[in-house]
Image (spheres, rainbow, N blue to C red):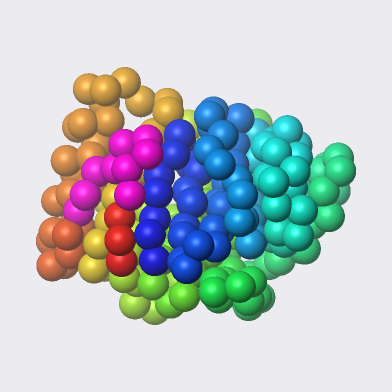
Amino acid sequence: MKITKYEHATLVLLIDGQQLVIDPGVFLTPPDFANTTAVVITHSHADHWTDQNLALILEKSPDAVIYAPQDVADTAADATITVVKAGDVATAGPFTLEFFGHEHATIHESVPVPENVGVMVNNEFYYGGDSYTGPGKPVGTLAAPIGAPWLKVGEAIDYVLEVKPQRAFYIHDMTLSAAGKGMASERLQWATEKNGGSYRPLEVGDSLDV
């Protein structure tokens, strides 16, 4: 499985020429969406999905299945959404998807908390969306959040220490300066290596084969 990081929280997973797109949000400069088998949207915030990016995906891959929580389905303009929640399992082409968690991490008591699902792909790759929910089982590769209004770097470190991935890279980085990202990335590297894992910072367009 080849994992490619794009802007902010967007990931593309590739197996045998078929793509799984995760969180195609507003910061994304769209890549080639041909051969997209499925899309996972973790929650309703615009930095994780837009109607425009879903339309671009479906233009190139009209049979792509889109998995998301109910509140995304309630607001999507022209896309059919397969609603998922914690405990659901789905198969799309070469991808087996398991969903975890219930809610977005709290930003502030004044800000509504949307539904959020984390996703594990093929018992190898895990991404929790905007939450610290782990899958409760071994993780080969973790996409670890590094910067957000809801994120404290100490909590992000504890999350990596709890999950104990074999490999990790950062995600959710558009809110940070280059200096801030470097500082936080060093702490996530420490947390990954503390449990014997390897850490690799991925910039936009960088890939990891697992």
**Picture quarter with the C terminus:** bottom left
Judge from the rendering whether residue 11 lies leftward or rightward of residue 81; answer left or right: left
* In-front residue for pair 172/122: 122
- How many marks on residues? 0
In percent of width and height, residue 29 lies at 53, 29
Residue 197 or residue 102, whichever sits in front: 197
From the image, give the main secondary structure of the stretch colored magenta. loop
On the image, the x and y values in percent for residue 28 come to: 54, 32
Query: Where does the magenta region start and end?
Result: 199-207
Residue 33 magenta: no
Residue depicted at x 21% and y 31%: 182
| As drawn, 53 above or below 170 | above
Q: In this view, does 172 lie to the left or right of 197?
A: right
- Give percent across and percent down for residue 145: 39, 45
Q: In this view, does 122 lie to the left or right of 195?
A: right
Residue pictured at 31% horizontal, 70% vertical: 140
